Amino acid sequence: MDLLLEKMLENKSSSEISTMLINLNKFHLNSKKHIKKYNKLRKLHSEIIDSMENYIIEGKYNINEHYNSIYNDIDKEIPELDFDLDLNDVDDRTILNDLFIYKNHSKLMSITEIYLQKNKFRNEEKLKMLNSMKNSYVGLFKVVATDRNEGYITYEDVFTKKRFKVIDIAMSSTLKVDKKRMIYVYNRIITFDDISFGTGIHCMMTSEHKLLKRFIKNHKYKNCSDFSRCILLYDLSKKENNLTVGYNNQYGYRR
């Protein structure tokens, strides 16, 4: 970092510095072939999500009705947790979208499945993205590596130990892995050809989170649906006191 930039950063708040670093790195990365493709795919994914949100708003997918069909199962999995999501809250809406747009329970028909079944899109790229969404992978991940120069972060699933190299410009620009204070993220990964990216579920915690430690130690992974696990971890993330997070839905996470 040159002297001029250091002087500029001296008078900036943490949030402003993060934004500056992200924008600088984004400018550097945007000429790269894989980032150009990533930006195109994120735009395509956003268009599909907008369509699906309208599908819900227009009453074509009754969330309450679908939730009631699995209520007893969810109540057995997380009897201690009573949750309520507000459509007017950005974070809550992101969680609500993930719960019903993607396949999170064996008994629940997702909107992605309905779109594929009803041939909602004839465009080849959108159809391919729908199938990528159908085959997406969701989990609780530990961030084990970042690559600022290429815009990548590496996730490791806490329970399955699977690793994923995901494009996340914001997180790769601002995060340095600290083994004494690891960052945990509950996120969904979509892979389209050779590009993987997170959908940006708003659940982020640190290894200092006592309730998260207890969850990881005691959680019965195979006996819990992704639907219940998402709700549980979202609730835990709201109790995180050791991390300030801003979410940039266009580029990923910002610390």
Image (cartoon, rainbow, N blue to C red):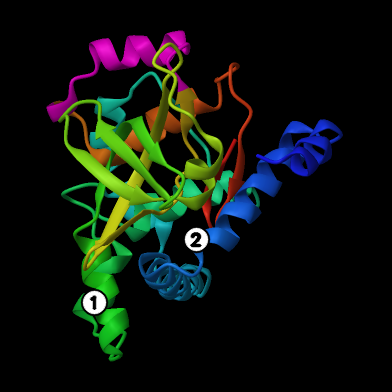
Residue at point 21% right, 38% down? 163
Q: Residue furthest bottom?
A: 122
- Which residue carries the number 1 mark? 128
Span of residues in magenta:
206-222
Task: Name the image quarter holding the C terminus.
Answer: top right
Q: Nearer the viewer, residue 120 or 126?
A: 126
Q: Nearer the viewer, residue 86 or 133?
A: 133
Name the side, left or right, on which 240 lies relative to 69. Answer: right
- Which residue carries the number 2 mark? 29
Task: Name the image quarter holding the N terminus.
Answer: top right
> Is residue 73 placed above or below 89 in the rendered structure?
above
> Is residue 98 placed above or below 74 in the rendered structure?
below
* Mark 1 crowdedness (10 Å alpha carbons): few <14, some 14-19, many ≥20: some
Name the side, left or right, on which 20 lies relative to 243. Answer: right
In the rendering, at what x and y percent does residue 161 appear? 17, 29
Asked if residue 179 can be seen in this view, the reply is yes
In primary-sequence order, the first of circles 1 and 2 is 2
Residue at point 57% right, 53% down? 25
In the rendering, at what x and y percent does residue 33 appear? 37, 71
In the rendering, at what x and y percent does residue 132 appear? 23, 66
Name the side, left or right, on which 106 lies relative to 227. Answer: left
> Circle 2 sits in a helix, a strand or a loop, which is it?
helix
**Amino acid beneath label 2:** Leu
In the rendering, at what x and y percent does residue 253 appear? 53, 44
To which quarter of the image does residue 126 belong?
A: bottom left
**Amino acid beneath label 1:** Lys
Query: Is 212 a magenta residue?
Result: yes
